[in-house]
Image (cartoon, helix red, strand yellow):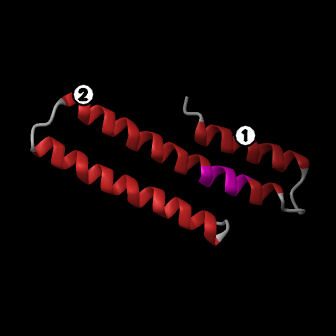
Amino acid sequence: MTGSKETKKKIENRLKRSEGQIRGVLKMLEEDKDCRDVVIQLSAIRSSIDRAIGVIVAENLKDCLAMDDLSEDEKEEKIKEAIELVVKK
């Protein structure tokens, strides 16, 4: 993955936080916590991971578009690919 060290660190921290949240949800399940609370936590995890995906795709796209050796058609294709990664059909 390309991108600045700062961006990579932010993504890594976000994913580690999500990992901790997943462990928390597993513990909630073991303790038979209310399903509403479990779903709220899972939604928070999903949101965090979605943001990480967005940052990764945006950084990669930014790097691709900065490449001088890509034609306008190739850049347009990269944009299309990025949109398809983020917007699931």
- Up-down relation of residue 23 to residue 86 (above or below): below
Q: Secondary structure at mark 1?
A: helix
Crowding at mark 1 (Cα within 10 Å: few <14, some 14-19, many 20+): few
Left or right, 59 with reference to 16 = right
User: Magenta segment: does it hold 51?
Assistant: no
Left or right, 79 with reference to 29 = right
Disc sitting over residue 56 in the figure: none
Q: Which residues are the magenta region?
A: 55-61
Q: Quadrant of residue 66?
A: bottom right
Residue ID for mark 1: 80
Q: Residue at (90%, 53%) from the top-left corner?
A: 71
**6 or 79: which is nearer to us?**
6
Left or right, 34 with reference to 64 = left
Q: Residue at (68%, 50%) from the top-left corner?
A: 58
Q: In terms of sequence position, does the residue under pointer 2 or pointer 1 come before the other?
A: 2
Residue ID for mark 2: 36
Per the picture, the main secondary structure of the magenta-coloured stretch is: helix
